[in-house]
Image: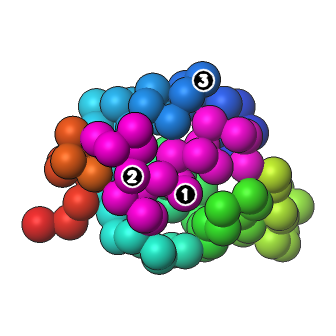
């Protein structure tokens, strides 16, 4: 499955993205381009050298043999922004503590 499909399948809202990451038992660090929940989820799905920004990400594409940059879908981007700040309707960081590292 390509990375765009994997990202789109995470959900249609930031809340759905968070719930799917919890279901996948993914944890991550705030403000981390390589250790955030999205990067860790993509690595769990078999992608390598993943670096996540708010609006785009890069990863090493084994088929092309080089880094590829991809635009992040809006729900995933919103999740990243809200996860980093600890705010999603006043609830994400408190509602989904499973996403934070131990």
Residue that label 2 marks = 87
Return the disc, 3 or 2, that comes first in the chain's sequence. 3
Farthest right residue in view: 64
Circle on res. 12: 3
Q: Which numbered disc, 2 or 1, marks the residue that appears first in the sequence?
A: 1
Q: In this view, does 35 lie to the left or right of 61?
A: left
Is any part of residue 41 visible from this angle? Answer: yes
- At x 73%, y 49%, the residue is 72
Is residue 6 toward the left or the right of residue 10 in the image? right
Q: Earlier in the sequence, mark 1 or mark 3?
A: 3
Q: Does residue 91 lie above or below 28 as drawn?
A: above
- The answer to whether residue 46 is above or below residue 10 is below
Residue indicated by mark 1: 81
Residue 7 place in picture, x, y as percent: 63, 38
Read off the magenta span: 72-92
Which residue is located at x 39 percent, y 52 percent?
Answer: 87
Q: Nearer the viewer, mark 2 or mark 1?
A: 2
């Amino acid at each position: 499955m390509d990375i765009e499909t994997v990202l789109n399948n995470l959900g249609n809202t930031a809340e759905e993205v968070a719930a799917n990451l919890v279901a996948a038992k993914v944890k991550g660090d705030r403000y981390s381009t390589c250790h955030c929940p999205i990067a860790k989820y993509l690595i769990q799905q078999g992608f390598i050298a993943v670096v996540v920004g708010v609006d785009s990400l890069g990863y090493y594409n084994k088929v092309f043999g080089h880094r590829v940059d991809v635009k992040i879908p809006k729900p995933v981007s919103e999740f990243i922004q809200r996860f980093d700040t600890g705010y999603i309707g006043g609830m994400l960081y408190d509602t989904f503590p499973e996403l934070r590292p131990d």
